[in-house]
Amino acid sequence: MKMNLSDYRICVIGLGYVGLPLARLFSTKFETIGFDMNQARVDALMAGHDATLEVSDQLLKEAIDSHGFMCTTDIEAIRDCNFYVVAVPTPVDKNNRPDLYPLLKASETVGKVISAGDIVVYESTVYPGVTEEECIPVVEKVSGLVFNKDFFAGYSPERINPGDKEHTVEKIRKVTSGSTPEIADIIDAVYNAVLINGTHKAPSIKVAEASKIIENSQRDVNIAFMNELAKIFNAMGIDTRDVIEAASSKWNFIKMSPGLVGGHCISVDPYYLIQKAQVYGVLPRIMFASRRLNDGMGAYVAEQTIKCMNKKGVMVKDSKILVLGFTFKENCPDTRNTKVIDIYHTLSEYTEDIVVYDPWVDAAQARHEYGVDVVNQLPQGSYDAIILAVAHDCFKTLDLKSLQKDNSVVYDVKGVLDRNIVDSRL
């Protein structure tokens, strides 16, 4: 199978936080089309704006005007492509079981348009085996083509960090893999054509899948350890972050901080490996315990705030509380799996007067997804408690004193506020 790199026409299926930056980057070297089922999303992108803020208006306009990049919901428009990249979400259901529906539907889409000699590469985070055992059979069934004879596949796990303007997609070193050695070389060359720091070519698709799933599982376990330490040291009356600073003076101490673990990666991906491990008769106790501990930190923050209020003699029932931040991380509009909602729900058992302020959030979307009214303008008034839940830069310079009552409580989840005005922090 011999083709010049310039002969590849790329289609990226799924234009969210992962797909759009990748498609924009590919468009700088290849003829590239972005495909998404959401017409409103496609219209906004073609008008030159990415609501996720992962691709600036300037870069998006340059891609469209200078590189011929286009986005579409028309499946016929992607039929002439020969290198398909699937970058759709891989969520979990309400019972934390992997939900492969978006991935399988995307595979059906590929099956409808793929031709002999074409390649499909999956970027969605999955447990080892999903690409070859779940997705490829769908492509075969719909297309009528035979895997590794008529068409080929690969896996290159996404490493997008939402809101991170330093580790952007072109700077990330990507893992690549292919269904045959020759295809692995081709996929590796295509990605290397647009990446500054190159690739790591894995020996198999399953190895590449596994490498992605443990990246976020490792972070989940490490953060869970820090959260457990925070609970221990808080009970002892010791500031956890002071302890971490002291310990990090040793050369081989891994410095991490406690916190809320939300988003689409760290709070979700471990469940994929947990389920697959059990199929093979292995019970991943550390991963289970880490997920359970991290999932409970939102309620813990609320309970600690209430504890502080009680100590200062602040009436918790019907109190007025301000929560700063609703996204799952700082300086980005992403609210997927935000654990701030757990703070809100726990507090709402005591008072209905809770104001959630986040200028980064699409208020209508937050209302639709979580049933919470998030305000984008700083509300005036005096509050019995203020919780800094997300470390947006704009929060670090807020005049919190103007929002406090005489005996108000300030709880700093992220450890970024002036220690002199904080009653407690995680």
Image (spheres, rainbow, N blue to C red):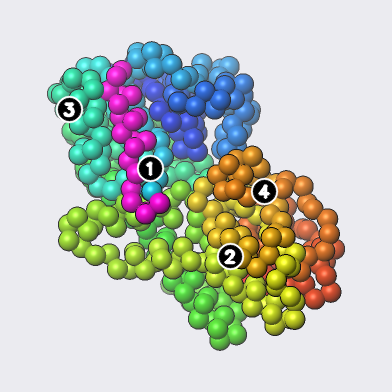
Residue ID for mark 2: 346
| Cα gap from disc 3 to disc 4, whole angstroms | 49 Å
- Callout 3, which amino acid? Phe
Residue positioned 23% across, 20% down in the render = 143
Depth check, mark 3 against mark 1: the one in front is: 1
Residue closest to the eye, 106 or 149: 106
Residue drawn where x is 29% and y is 19% of the image: 112
Q: Earlier in the sequence, mark 4 or mark 1?
A: 1
Q: Nearer the viewer, residue 102 or 87?
A: 102
Instruction: From the viewer's side, name the closer residue of 306 and 260.
Output: 306
Is 177 magenta? The answer is no
Mark 3 or mark 2, which is nearer the start of the sequence?
A: 3
- Under circle 4, the secondary element is loop
Disc 2 from disc 1: Cα separation: 28 Å
Left or right: 320 as drawn, with respect to 333: right
Please, is residue 231 above or below residue 114 in the view? below
| Label 1 secondary element | loop
| Residue matched to label 4 | 373
Q: Residue at x 20, y 25 (%)?
A: 141
Give how far apart the Cα atoms at labels 4 and 1 are. Answer: 27 Å
Residue at numbered disc 1? 90
**Label located before the other in sequence (2 or 1):** 1
Q: Is residue 393 visible?
A: no
Disc 1 crowd rating (10 Å Cα; few below 14, some 14-19, many 20+) is some
Q: CA distance from mark 4 to mark 2?
A: 16 Å
What is the distance, in whole Å, between disc 3 and disc 1 at their CAs?
23 Å
Main SS of the magenta part reads helix
Per the rendered image, the range of residues in magenta is 94-113
Mark 2 or 3, closer to the camera: 2
Q: Amino acid at mark 1?
A: Thr
Crowding around mark 3 (Cα neighbors within 10 Å: few <14, some 14 to 19, many 20+) is some
